[in-house]
């Protein structure tokens, strides 16, 4: 599977979910974490079921381990795991998945905290379920009061650390989705240091990401 363009869509927004599968993203990630209000998270699962999505190209960004049964019952190919920080965390999830899954469930860790950065080696060595990892710079920057400028130089060393431990990882999203020139520059920079794809948050970013990666 390619991960050039990884499109994130909120799990409670039916129109956006359905539209995602008319686009040319390599992977669709339906989110039931940060983009879904707390009081709509359970309803989001019903919406996802009703949309009858292509599960062979769909990951679920889970909110917590309670979502794992939903993922395995619906036979999605894998999860994006927010705030992945240790091998112990991965072992715990592996145990839960094994108890219920019919198909082996991939885990794509999102590295978005200092603890995750510190434990990159042990996370990336968890080959049982991990084929690729992803970088989430925004929560990391927020947690350490790091202001990231337009050239993203402040997160360059973090990017290099990610690449040094994982082949062709998925780069962080670019939040100003109206700035396609800035997005393209971000993609080119990520590609130049070894990333294999980019998290996309808007349809307009997909073709740029596909072209560069």
Image (spheres, helix red, strand yellow):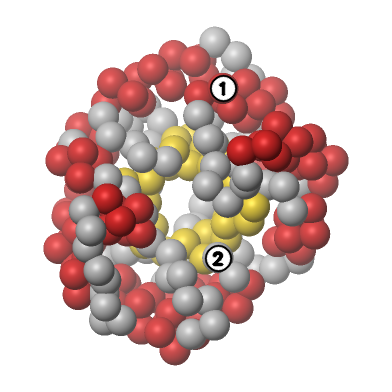
Regarding mark 2 in the picture, which secondary structure is present there?
A: loop
Quadrant in which residue 183 is drawn: bottom left
- Position of 48 relative to 169 (above/below): above
* Crowd rating for badge 1 (residues with CA inside 10 Å; few <14, some 14–19, many 20+): few
Left or right, 187 with respect to 56, comes to left
The answer to which image quadrant residue 43 occupies is top right
Residue 116 locus on image (x, y percent): 24, 40
Q: Residue at x 48, y 85 (%)?
A: 179
Figure check: 109 above or below 24: above
Residue 85, disc? none
With respect to residue 70, does 174 lie above or below? below
Q: Quadrant of residue 173?
A: bottom left
Crowding near pointer 2: few (<14 within 10 Å), some, many (20+)?
Answer: some
Counting from the top left corner in percent of width and height, residue 208 is at 51, 80
Residue beneath the point at 74% across and 53% down:
13
Q: How many numbered marks does the figure carry?
A: 2
Image-based side of 133 in relation to 119, left or right: right
Residue 104 in sight from this viewpoint: no
Question: In this view of the protein, can residue 8 be seen by the observer?
Answer: yes
Question: What label does residue 66 carry, if any?
Answer: 1
State the residue at coordinates (31%, 46%): 111
Looking at the image, which is closer to me, 155 or 187? 155
Mark 1: which secondary structure? helix
Compared with 146, 143 (above or below) is above
Return the disc, 1 or 2, that comes first in the chain's sequence. 1
Residue at the image point whose x is 72% and y is 47% from the top: 12
Give the residue furthest to the right. Answer: 50
* Position in image of residue 110 (x %, y %): 38, 45
Locate residue 77, reporting x and y percent: 59, 37
Mark 1–mark 2 distance (CA, rounded to whole Å):
25 Å
**Residue that badge 2 annotates:** 201
């Amino acid at each position: 599977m390619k991960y050039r363009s990884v499109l994130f869509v909120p799990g409670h927004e039916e129109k956006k979910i359905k539209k995602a599968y008319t686009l040319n993203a390599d992977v669709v990630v339906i989110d039931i974490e940060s983009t879904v209000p707390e009081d709509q998270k359970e309803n989001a699962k019903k919406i996802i079921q009703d949309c009858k999505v292509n599960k062979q190209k769909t990951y679920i960004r889970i909110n917590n381990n309670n979502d794992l049964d939903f993922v395995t019952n619906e036979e999605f190919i894998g999860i994006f795991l927010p705030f992945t920080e240790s091998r112990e965390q991965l072992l715990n999830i592996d145990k839960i998945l094994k108890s219920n899954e019919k198909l082996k469930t991939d885990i794509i860790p999102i590295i978005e905290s200092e603890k995750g950065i510190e434990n990159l080696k042990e996370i990336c060595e968890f080959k049982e379920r991990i084929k690729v990892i992803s970088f989430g710079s925004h929560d990391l920057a927020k947690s350490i009061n790091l202001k990231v400028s337009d050239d993203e130089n402040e997160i360059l060393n973090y990017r290099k650390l990610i690449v040094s431990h994982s082949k062709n990882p998925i780069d962080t999203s670019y939040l100003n989705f109206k700035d396609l020139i800035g997005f393209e520059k971000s993609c080119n920079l990520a590609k130049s240091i070894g990333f294999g794809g980019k998290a996309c948050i808007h349809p307009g970013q997909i073709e740029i990401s596909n072209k560069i990666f």
